[in-house]
Amino acid sequence: MASKSDIPENVVTILDSLGDSDRKCVIDYITSLQSKINEDAPNVGNFDDHDNDTEYYPPYYDKDSSVEDFDSVADFKQKAADAKSNVDWGQALEFYNKAVVLAPPSALLYANRAIALEKLEHYKAAERDCNYALEINPDSGKALKVRGSLRHKHLKDWRGALSDLNQSQAIDFDSDVAETLKELTKLRVEEEKREAQDRIEKEEKLKKRASDIKKAKEEAKKEEANRARDSTGMPGGMPGGMPGGMPGGMPGGMPGGMPGGMGNIMEMLQNDPELQEAMKNPKVIAAFSEIMNSPGGPMSLMSNPAKMQQLMSDPEVGPVMQKLMSKMMGGGGMPGGMPGNPSGGNDDDIPDLGDLPDLE
């Protein structure tokens, strides 16, 4: 049962005002609460049975509290220092915990408690104390050094360790830390090499992809041109001529006709580099395809002056037709005129051949 000496004076006064039965009931309840608190409270001085898988949370100063017992803080800090000298880290942590809650802690107090927490394998709690210390004083070399050591040895954060220890060295040089920094710098160099290699591989992949896309576009363009040639019924640039031809020439408007019929046209196309080049033009191919596939074939032009004019007026098709007709007529143009114009005079619907651009 709790004694009156364990109960605050104002609570004792209230208890004295109660009857014996009620007072006993309240005191028994207070006793049970104290027992439960003692059972649940961590044994700060005994860490032999500490479960390192359970994160430890030491007490912290209550900022809303008005407590500022700096004399007691100094006393507990001295006791903690003595315990550290005796390598009694559990006792040291107990005194640091008491000092922390009695007045606003300094950065140095947090850094010293972080050392005790690290020794007792409370690595996350130690890092938090270093964080608090650096919030109070960002230039705390000790807090930076302790946190850098924690991150390097226990928290698997070598980048954070490298940053902390570099800063601590700038504030307070330590030869041991210098050796650690050599190791961490080596890790950084290796990482930079890996990052550079990754960048190179990524760039190579992008270049290859761009090359593949360009090649695919070129192939698609080539296939499109092949399909255009195929659609004219003149595969491969019209090798082998145009089946069906126009044997006997075009009688009835071109005296003497077109000697040799379509066989001569194929021969002219094969022997004239300019005509071969012109027949690569999809527009020219389409025009010749239309002529060949129209009712009556090429002969239909003889009865369709408007169509002849349209073709001859085209800046791409006209010169090719002019050259073909010139060669078929032996270089003499179209003697005798077209059907329906036996006089050979100019038809207003058909441009003079001399007015058209020449391929030669």
Image (cartoon, rainbow, N blue to C red):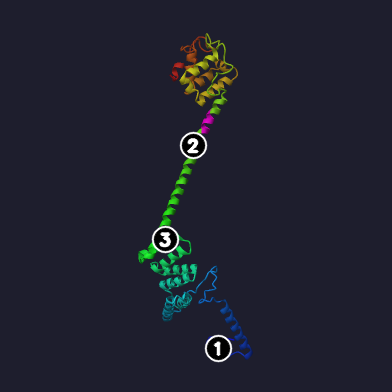
Check whether the beta carbons of the residues at disc 2 and disc 3 lie within 8 A of each other.
no
Which residue of the protein is positioned furthest toward the right in this rendering? 21
Q: How far apart are marks 1 and 2 (CA)?
A: 92 Å
Q: Name which quarter of the figure residue 31 lies in.
A: bottom right
The correct choice, above or below, for 208 with respect to 4 in the image is above
Q: Name the kind of residue labelled 3 in the image.
A: Leu
Give the number of marks.
3
Across and down, in percent, residue 150 comes to 45, 65
- Foreground tag (1 vs 3): 3
Residue 302 shown in magenta: no
Residue at the spot of label 3: 162
10 Å neighbourhood of mark 3: few (<14), some, or many (≥20)?
many
Mark with earlier residue (1, 3): 1
Q: Can residue 162 be seen in this view?
A: yes
Q: Name which quarter of the figure residue 293 lies in.
A: top right
Q: Is residue 348 visible?
A: no
Q: Secondary structure beneath disc 2?
A: helix
Q: Name which quarter of the figure residue 250 lies in.
A: top right
Q: Give the range drawn in magenta.
A: 219-225
- Residue toward you, 343 or 24: 24
Residue at the spot of label 2: 214
Mark with earlier residue (2, 3): 3
Across and down, in percent, residue 161 comes to 43, 62
Q: Name the kind of residue labelled 1 in the image.
A: Lys
Q: Secondary structure beneath disc 1?
A: helix
Residue at the spot of label 1: 4
Q: How far apart are marks 1 and 3 (CA)?
A: 56 Å
